[in-house]
Amino acid sequence: MDKVYLRNAPETEELHITFRYANEALKVDRDFNFCRRMDECIDEALIRIRNNIEKEASKRNKKKSKKTAIVEDAPPPPMPSEILVGIHRKDSVDSIAGITFKELLSDLTQELQLRVMDKPLDIVFNQPWVAGLQLPSSIMAGYLVYPLKLQLQFATRQHSRAQWYKTLKPTSTKAEWTPCTEGFIYQVTEEDLDYFLKLVVTPGNEQGVYGPAVEYISSTSVQAGPRNCPYESRQQFTKQSLSNPDEFRVVSYNLLADLYADGDYARQTLFPYCAPSALKIDYRKQLFIKELVGYNADLLCLQEVDIKIFDYDLQPVLTDFQGIMTPKGKCAEGIAMFYRTSRFELLHKYELHLGDNISSLPIFAPLWQRIKHNEQLASRICDRSTTLQLCLFQLKDTKRYLLVANTHLYFHPDADHIRLLQIGFSLIFVEHIYKQAIKEHRITDPQNIGLVFCGDFNSVPECGIYKLMTEQFVDSNFVDWRSNQQEAVQDVELRQSFKMLSACGTPEFTNYTTLFAACLDYIFYQSDSFDLLQSVPLPSVDELSAHEAIPSVSFPSDHVSLIADLKFKSMN
């Protein structure tokens, strides 16, 4: 690194200075890093640089002199009286002084150099840079590996280079690194077992400029992954992608956010039966990503998605998809929707935080007026962070439109009435957007638009949500309204206009833990717009209980995924 790298991120005053200085006479050979300000006079920064180099030289020479004194009484080599440090225009003997970095860097028509003693170092400004690189703590054969952390500055992932290597002895000075593959994602194989991996990233930008390479070596060797996971047998039903323009495959899956799996409460109370290593997100994400990829889906509706997993795992791996992330309020997790860009054009997307809008959105007023007088009820439902995603797509090369909803309703056992109201408000919003889409896109045949509603509804088939979805009506005497006596809902009935069915029916379990097991997740579809081509069979009870319950070494979540193939009905 015979260069000095200056970096000033947009909209900040910080200036980061990085260079390596080697001087055999001074016994100095190390990287130097400084954080200064753009409005600082360069003279002050040069003093700091000089002082740091002098300290390093003095420290090294003291160590050297002690070793020399043991052998002989010869005096240590003399230190220079002063280490000269200056910034110059290239080919100029005059140093630059008395100006700020902002002024210095405003004119880069002439090349700049930092000169330390007689050694010139070319100064480069805002070159592509790797600000952070890290690999996951768990890497398994048969699964994908990619950076756990990759922070680029003045560079893009698509214009950067990545190369994977492997070795059995990473700490050896004579370690031989065998090239594996190029690219940021590596499919680890059985041949990699017990090897350590190294990723070398060279940052680049669209102008074809490359910055200094950075490498990271895995902290652990490649381990054997779980074999014969139940999702692999389910993937036998999804080997082929759907090619008919009127057909599409949808997946709904609660991933179990790391927020709820990483902690003493999760390990000791919620999932004590699960091996602690199998609860770690670096382990679990390898399973659910391989599972999702193998379903060859067109739409993914996900719940309990950590923001970090969306940013650093799902988006980089699901390269054929566009993702939409909607956090639940200020929470670090939320719901996410991915759609295959070769199949769908996104026309509109809506993100509705129910608690924030129930009391203010005009279309909600009739229902809100019926419940707002119960202050305890009103407060509880408005305080929830429950969120609804709603996207309007057009299937490419067709005149078909698809409205997809995704949600994760409130979980509490005494809250059947809250969940029923949440889905009631959600369907009011969905119907409003549905009618708006028909008008805006001039859809004359109602069979050219259909609704799919996915999610973790936290509601069993006997409850009001399933009844409202499939029978379109819940009367005012339904038992759910009284799930909490202090918040009991009076004189409210719900209707909705969509003829909906559950694509996967009402399986015995979609959630399976030792504390609770039931059917909570659904893919509801509009039955007068779609035909169900197939729903992929769910894991058996024997599979779910093989390690007592889930999550486990072969199940990455406490929920199982739902997969359904749907087809638009023939046009009238």
Image (cartoon, rainbow, N blue to C red):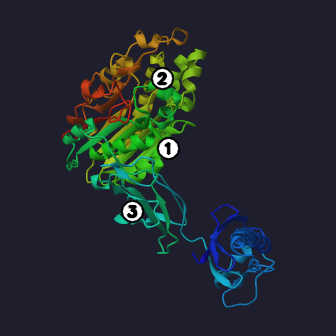
* Residue under pointer 2: 269
* Residue under pointer 1: 307
Residue name at image x 45 percent, y 27 percent: 409
Q: Is residue 154 above or below residue 286?
A: below
Tell me the kind of residue under disc 2: Thr
Comparing 554 with 377, the one in front is 554
First in sequence: mark 2 vs mark 1: 2
User: Which image quadrant for residue 106?
Assistant: bottom right
Q: Which mark is residue 164?
A: 3
The spot of residue 256 in percent (x, y) is 43, 34
Tell me the kind of residue under disc 3: Trp
Tell me the kind of residue under disc 1: Ile
First in sequence: mark 3 vs mark 2: 3
First in sequence: mark 1 vs mark 3: 3
Marks 1/3: CA distance?
A: 26 Å
Residue name at image x 35 percent, y 42 percent: 287
